[in-house]
Image (cartoon, rainbow, N blue to C red):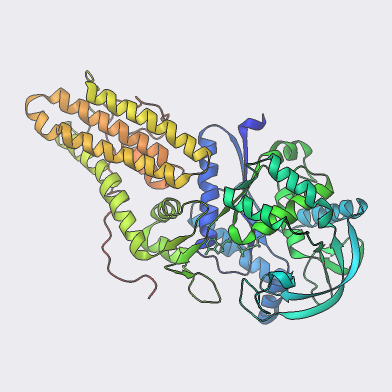
Amino acid sequence: MPDNTFYITTPIYYSNDEPHIGHSYTTILADVLARYHRSIGQDVFFLTGLDEHGQKVQQAAESRNITPQEHCDDMAPKWKTLWEKLHIQFDDFIRTTEPRHQEVVKNILTKVMDAGDIYMDEYGGHYCVGCERFYTEKELEGEKCPQHGKELEFITEKNYFFKMSKYQEALIGYINKNPGFIQPEHRKNEILGFLRQPLDDLCISRPKNRLSWGVELPFDSDYVTYVWFDALLNYVTAPGYLGNTEDFEKWWPQAVHLIGKDILMTHAVYWPTMLMSAGIPLPKKIFAHGWWLLGESKMSKSLGNVVDPLKLIDEYGVDPVRYYLMREMVPGQDSSFTVESFIKRYNSDLANDFGNLLSRVTNLMHKYFEGKIPDWGESTPAEDKMRENAESTTYIVNELMKSMRINEAIEETMQFIRSVNKYLEKQAPWTLIKEDQSSAGRVLITASESLRIGAKLLQPIMPNRTKTLLDTFGTGNAELGWGQMKPGNTLKKHNQLFPRIEIRKNFES
Ligand code: MSP
């Protein structure tokens, strides 16, 4: 049942890069979505991996005096370790040097060739090694690469070209007919704007005498495949394009590609036209998120100001890092990363509102109910309101998660948590207990149940700490809906969920 399946991808990262907070963001976002879709009972396939061919890898290996394959084999575990540390539960980790992928690249190239969409031509252009692509005059800023600001070399050579221009009209038609294909809206408009100009054909080969580290063209052994033509195909390799047809047909139509805004052109123009030529249907959605800036400036390896996610995790824990990245970025816009804003967000949302609520209810239950969950009792309008509130929050959060508005889903949940704190404050079970133990019990179980639901809603974002919370109440496996708290259950001991952090040092120094 296609409606019950969800296929999510991250870009495949250049294997020789140092993983930073930008890569971590996309991968966490994919993981949050994958966990959410699993939690609502969907069949999920979550793919990430590494882009291992191309000039940058070849150069990096040369500078280390090892083969490119050795270099890639050395780098891959670094990425996997980071994803493990960030609690990323991917279903497949693809590396473009794997035989299963190289076979697909050759197969598709043959198909595109057979469709009459590949020709040879002499080409001159400004080439950027950093971007691994040629820039046309109109794309350049002076003689410089618009991404890297570096002066570019003019290179002339014979190469193979993909007739991308042949599919320009079909692509425009497709984008117009499928308004959700490129998101957010302003990115779609950017692509449609770009497509108003005649589309150039795409150079898809590199002569081996310049670059040998790539997938050899099936029709000319003097050339390897252009790294983007190779890399994009990972998205069809993994779900079984040449393997299991049934699997491929199940996953592929549901594909959602998460990407950064800098690789929109390759995904929204190169990729769909390649698929059209190969006779493969287009993915369901391409979602381009914004960039993490370091304060006000761009984060990049060459500027030497990348935030190391491992350092952040060691310092503050995985779940808070996941929470911050998901809460702070408005999808589609840029966001500024600062340690100060991280600590502020942590202290206000996680320590004060969320963690404190757990300590308050459990302390009171230990004090007045021998560490056991009290009875529900007779509910009053105040409890009915909490329940209604929990149900409407659940509904809204579900809608927001489905449309990938994670930051808003988090904010809705936190507003709900704040309303539970207010309920507790107003009902004051610490005063009630003096005259009416059962009313105090009713308030505590209601607040705990509400908190439990809040934790369930935050589970895809913070799987670990929410588990501690759910286990405290003995509700680790309970459903989301209201009324799962079991009176008489003994509370499990827990450490403070989110101890406050004091601003003591500057992380970057
Ligand atoms: N290998 C290509 C992708 C091929 S996909 C078929 C590539 N790799 S990358 O490692 O350079 O970048 C991968 C992703 O990281 C991109 O989506 C990019 O937007 C993202 N980010 C890199 N720096 C970033 C930030 N500072 N902030 C957010 N995302 C950033 O491109």
Instruction: Locate residue 445 relative to residue 429 in the image: left or right.
Output: right
Q: Residue at x 70, y 79 (%)?
A: 152
Residue at image coords 76%, 42%: 281
Q: Would you place residue 177 above or below residue 277 in this image?
A: above
Residue 310 visible (yes or no):
yes
Residue lying at the far front in this picture: please name it: 196
Q: Which residue ends up furthest to the left in the rendered image?
A: 435
Q: Quadrant of residue 311?
A: bottom left
Which residue sits furthest top?
Answer: 378
Residue toward you, 85 or 380: 380
| Image location (x, y in percent) of residue 400 | 48, 39
Point out residue 46 in the picture as x, y percentages from the top left corner: 61, 46
The N terminus: image quadrant: top right
Left or right of 251 in this view: 201: right
Left or right, residue 405 beside residue 97 = left
Which of the four quarters of the rendered structure image does ligand 1 lie in?
bottom right
Residue at 7% across / 29% down in the picture?
Answer: 434
Q: Is residue 232 shown left or right of residue 392?
A: right
| Residue 498 appearing in the image | no
Q: Position of residue 168 (x, y in %)?
A: 78, 52
Residue at 87% x, 53% y: name it. 112
Q: Is residue 279 above or below residue 136?
A: above
Quarter of the figure that contains the C terminus: bottom left
Q: Total of numbered circles in the picture?
A: 0
Task: Please tell me in which quadrant of the rendered image residue 383 appears.
Answer: top left
Residue 303: image location, x then y, percent: 52, 76
